[in-house]
Image (cartoon, rainbow, N blue to C red):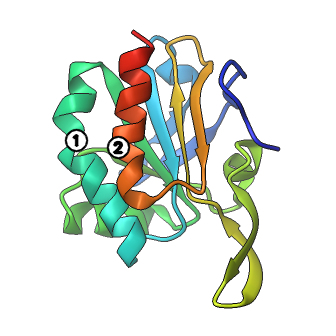
Amino acid sequence: MALSPGDPAPEFDLTADDGSEVTLASLRGQKVVLYFYPKDDTPGCTRQACALRDAQADFDKVGATVLGVSPDSPESHARFRDKYALGFRLLADQDHATAEAYGAWGEKTNYGKTSMGIIRSAFVIDENGKIVLAKYNVKPEATAPGALAALASGE
């Protein structure tokens, strides 16, 4: 089920790349950019993460916390984070329950093969836990500018 602006953001409790537990409830009072990506250290996902990393100062200016989510393990996330000096946490959704709650898990076709997997998606969540932006099938390079535009219009 796809989410839309104004919807309450689904709660989550996920393990981060540093082993800590991150919950949406613990982020109340902060703006959150939550993006879902298929796999650590693949070309599109690396471009997406590095574009978000390169925009970190802009996210900091508007007080937004950036979090990436994929089905990879916390250990894989730590290697990916360190390799590209990502300045934000990556969360492990190994059973893809959070992706399902956000409508970011579904049928995909790649090179003529259909399978279930992460639908590259980006969400901006306001301080009260409401969805401000919900983008599905987002291009890797469009994630950061789209989130920043939503954050700017929401202020």
Q: Nearer the N terminus, badge 1 or badge 2? A: 1
Name of the residue lying farthest toward the bottom = 112
Left or right of 8 on screen, residue 154: left
* Residue 74 in the image, given as x and y percentages of width and height: 45, 61
* Residue 86 in the image, given as x and y percentages of width and height: 24, 53
Query: Is residue 53 in view from this perspective?
Result: yes
Quarter occupied by the N terminus: top right
How many angstroms separate mark 1 from mark 2 (CA)? 7 Å
Query: Which sits in the foreground, 43 or 129?
Result: 43
Residue positioned 57% across, 45% down in the render: 14
Query: Which sits in the foreground, 45 or 96?
Result: 45
Q: Amino acid at mark 1?
A: Ala
Residue position marked by numbered label 1 in the rendering: 55
Q: Amino acid at mark 2?
A: Ala
Residue position marked by numbered label 2 in the rendering: 144
Query: Is residue 78 in view from this perspective?
Result: no
